[in-house]
């Protein structure tokens, strides 16, 4: 084994080894392996679950306000340690440092929202629902909960999950992406520093073996997953079959409609960030533009060409770069192959980023921005999620044509419309079969006090991530009905169904 620094697990408040398998963690900007990650085996994951299980009774009994104070302290620690955390994100994911800071800020907002848990957990009370009978509903913690997260938001997506889970009185086992696990681990250590008792949050690194152990273990009551659709579907089916509550967020292919009356220069600026920000590795990225009318399409393509020529591609540590590398060599090859396939399938490659070179970083996984025109529904580059800096333009005649395309696609995560026509925008937002919709807003990612979730094969389960849905996901409703009959008053039996008739 090489002498790389080893990344361990965090169980019961301690960094521990566990598992005999390991893999390298690369810096995508240099192509160099910089760390070695231990991959948890079944026994190690079971230790983490046991630690969460043991911590649960005391944590459940802790007053919600005390739990919330830990979140308030964590928020401050995250702000104080932002540079450290984001340096880890950039070193392992590759995204530009300013983008990492944006991701962290969205994560911090989830911690902030979790600190309002006492208010959110207040429940519902009704007095005198029948003669002298009072009734109330309360939201009780589930027990041990777990989260499995993707590589593309290594710090934010874990913060969508565990802060609200623990603020509601649960304990948690997190399995971050094996490609960029360090920022989630550092955040978990900051949570300990903020006063989270050992065992309330455990982090296991690993792959399918770790995930399958979480899916099988009876002590795990609920699983939140974010990642690709085939794995989301697997997690949902397996978790549900094992009696767990599951929410599994999957992949995406988000369309932006540009109407003939849109402010094209502003739409082009918005599309640049939405398509190429974070190298297109966002589930809310815009990889498809649906232009209504050829004149609109021509203007959008011309504008994008000009803007792409100005883009700076390079390592994420240099804040002046617009786009960093793709996450791994394997992913780089996959995205490049999609571009080859788009050409082979007959789309017009207007800008070819395949031969981009970043001096001094020849081994990094850099791909320049690619732009296709004349993308058609039957093409693989239309149907599949590429998850790279590849934007395709499609041409349709009417808004309804655009909407029919979007509705027929298997994914329904996000979409947006660029227009100055309020009626068209209202019709679009009302009818489109997509979970998160923007009007002149290219990345309509809900803020922490709303919830995040797509439709169709972008989400399996009934409740979305974070926001009010997270409070419902991480708690069980219990309804209590109570009366206190007067002492000494004899009451007869009632055989009809209790009602106020
Ligand atoms: P992925 O599905 O490969 O991995 C996600 C997690 O699942 C990781 O922790 C990984 O270790 C685990 N995993 C992978 N293969 C597994 C298997 N066979 N069995 C059990 N577990 C397995 O996803 P990724 O490449 O890390 O992330 C990118 C994907 O995530 C994209 O499809 C993107 O759209 C999606 N994503 C969706 C959202 C959303 O909110 N809908 C947000 C972010 C990312």
Image (cartoon, rainbow, N blue to C red):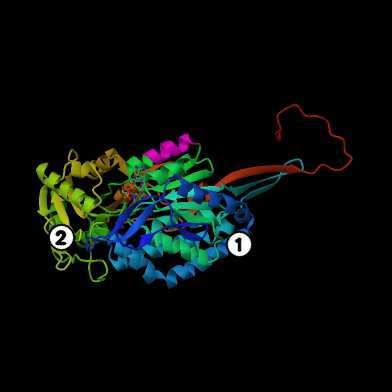
115 is higher (above) or lower (below) than 380: below
Q: Residue 176: x and y, percent? A: 39, 53
Could you classify mark 2 by the number of other residues whose Cα lies within 10 Å: few (under 14), some (14-19), or many (20 or more)? some
Q: For ligand 1, tell me if the residue under mark 2 lies within 8 Å.
A: no
Q: Which segment did they paint magenta?
A: 234-242
Residue 292 seen in the current view: no
Q: Which residue is mark 2?
A: 303
Left or right: residue 328 compared with residue 87:
left
Q: Foreground mark, 1 or 2? A: 1
Which element type, helix, strand or loop, lies under badge 2? helix
Residue lying farthest to the bottom in this orientation: 80
Q: Nearer the viewer, residue 146 or 400?
A: 146
Residue underneath mark 1: 65
Tell me if residue 6 is in the magenta stretch.
Answer: no
Q: Is mark 1 within 8 Å of ligand 1?
A: no
Query: Which quadrant holds the C terminus?
Result: top right
Drawn side of residue 467 relative to residue 433, left or right: right
């Amino acid at each position: 084994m090489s002498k790389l620094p080893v990344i361990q697990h965090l169980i019961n408040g301690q960094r521990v080894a566990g598992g005999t398998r390991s893999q390298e963690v690369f810096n995508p900007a240099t192509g160099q392996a910089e760390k070695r990650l231990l991959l948890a085996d079944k026994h190690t994951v079971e230790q983490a679950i046991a630690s969460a299980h043991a911590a649960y009774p005391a944590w459940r009994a802790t007053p919600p306000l005390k739990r919330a104070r830990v979140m308030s302290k964590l928020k401050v620690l995250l702000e104080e340690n932002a540079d450290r955390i984001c340096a880890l994100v950039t070193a392992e994911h590759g995204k530009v440092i300013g983008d990492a800071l944006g991701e962290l800020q969205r994560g911090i907002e989830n911690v902030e929202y979790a600190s309002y848990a006492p208010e959110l957990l207040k429940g519902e009370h009704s007095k005198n629902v029948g003669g002298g009978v009072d009734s109330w509903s309360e939201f009780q913690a589930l027990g041990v909960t777990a989260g499995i997260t993707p590589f593309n938001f290594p710090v934010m997506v874990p913060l969508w999950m565990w802060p609200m889970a623990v603020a509601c009185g649960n304990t948690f086992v997190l399995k971050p992406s094996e490609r960029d696990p360090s920022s989630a681990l550092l955040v978990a250590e900051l949570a300990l520093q903020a006063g989270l008792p050992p065992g309330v949050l455990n982090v296991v690194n690993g792959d399918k073996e770790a995930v399958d152990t979480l899916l099988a273990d009876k002590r795990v009551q609920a699983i939140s997953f974010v990642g690709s659709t085939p794995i989301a579907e697997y997690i949902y089916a397996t978790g549900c079959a094992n009696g767990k509550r599951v929410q599994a967020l999957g992949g995406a292919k988000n369309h932006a409609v540009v109407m003939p009356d849109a402010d094209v220069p502003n739409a082009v600026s918005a599309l640049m960030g939405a398509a190429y920000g974070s190298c297109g590795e966002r589930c809310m990225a815009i990889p498809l533009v649906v232009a209504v009318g050829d004149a609109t399409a021509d203007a959008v393509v011309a504008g994008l060409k000009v803007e792409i020529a100005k883009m700076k591609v390079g390592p994420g540590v240099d804040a002046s770069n617009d786009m960093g590398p793709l996450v791994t060599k394997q992913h780089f090859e996959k995205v490049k192959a999609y571009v080859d396939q788009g050409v082979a399938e007959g789309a017009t490659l207007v800008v070819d980023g395949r031969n981009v070179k970043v001096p001094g970083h020849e081994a990094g996984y850099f791909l320049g921005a690619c732009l296709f025109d004349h993308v058609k529904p039957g093409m693989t580059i239309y149907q599949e999620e590429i998850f790279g800096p590849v934007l395709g333009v499609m041409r349709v005649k009417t808004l309804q044509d655009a909407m029919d395309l979007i509705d027929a696609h298997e994914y329904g995560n996000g979409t947006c419309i660029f227009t100055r026509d309020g009626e068209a925008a209202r019709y679009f937002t009302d009818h489109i079969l997509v979970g998160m919709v923007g009007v002149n807003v290219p990345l309509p990612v809900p803020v922490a006090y709303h919830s995040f979730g797509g439709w169709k094969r972008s989400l399996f389960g009934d409740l979305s991530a974070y926001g009010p849905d997270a409070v419902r996901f991480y708690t069980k409703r219990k309804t209590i009905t109570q009366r206190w009959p007067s002492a000494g008053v004899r009451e007869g039996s009632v055989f009809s169904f209790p009602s106020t008739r």
